[in-house]
Image: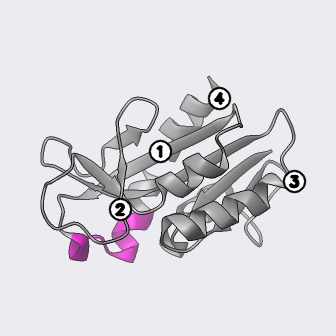
Amino acid sequence: MLYVITALKAEAQAFVEKFKLIEYKNENIALFISGIGKENMYNTTLKVLKSFQEDDKILNIGICGATTSYKIGQLIDARVEKITCVDYEVTQSEYSIVDMESAGFIEATKNIKNSYIFKVVSDHFEPHAATKEKAKKLIFDKIDEIMKEIQA
């Protein structure tokens, strides 16, 4: 089973549409929406892990802000790139990549080998530019690439 956790419904909608999920699940995928922030992500991830089996995989996917050295729509793999988790909207480039949930997911999955974090750059520290439709499209456009990465 692949457990997918997003912070926003718009991010989740990409998976619902791509995999034709009914009530956020099918036989291979279960999708959860945590809400914004690392505490919400942490608590949701712990609940999901109660059903987790050894061969299962768990994925946190969402949008992030980044400096202009990253392209809008670029996929960020947290195993490769450093993501700074903050609890506020960032409007200046004091960090390279920021999101609001990754730290909660990392803390909850610290003992899980099949855990993944992927973020898609939605803006260059212009949070107002990250609309619901844009978030859904950005995630949708990267699902195939993400699935290849976690199947490897």
Instruction: Name the side, left or right, on which 74 lies relative to 42.
Output: left
Place of residue 10 in the rendered image (x, y in percent of width and height, measured from the top left)? 49, 72
For discs 1 and 3, the disc positioned in front in the rendered view: 3
Please tell me whether residue 92 belongs to the stretch shown in magenta: no
3 and 2 marks in contact (CB < 8 Å): no
* Location of mark 3 (residue): 51
In the image, the segment drawn in magenta is: 127-136
| Badge 2 amino acid | Val
Which is more toward the observer, 39 or 56? 39
Q: Residue at x 73, y 58 (%)?
A: 46
* Location of mark 1 (residue): 118
Instruction: Name the side, left or right, on which 66 lies relative to 12.
Output: left
Which is more toward the observer, 108 or 96? 108
- In terms of sequence position, does the residue under pointer 1 or pointer 3 come before the other? 3
Which is more toward the observer, 62 or 106? 106
**Distance between mark 1 and mark 4 Cα atoms:** 14 Å
* Location of mark 4 (residue): 151
- In terms of sequence position, does the residue under pointer 4 or pointer 2 come before the other? 2
3 and 4 marks in contact (CB < 8 Å): no
Q: Quadrant of residue 130?
A: bottom left
Query: Dot 1: what SS?
Result: strand
Place of residue 116 in the rendered image (x, y in percent of width and height, measured from the top left)? 57, 40
- In terms of sequence position, does the residue under pointer 2 or pointer 1 come before the other? 2
* Location of mark 2 (residue): 86
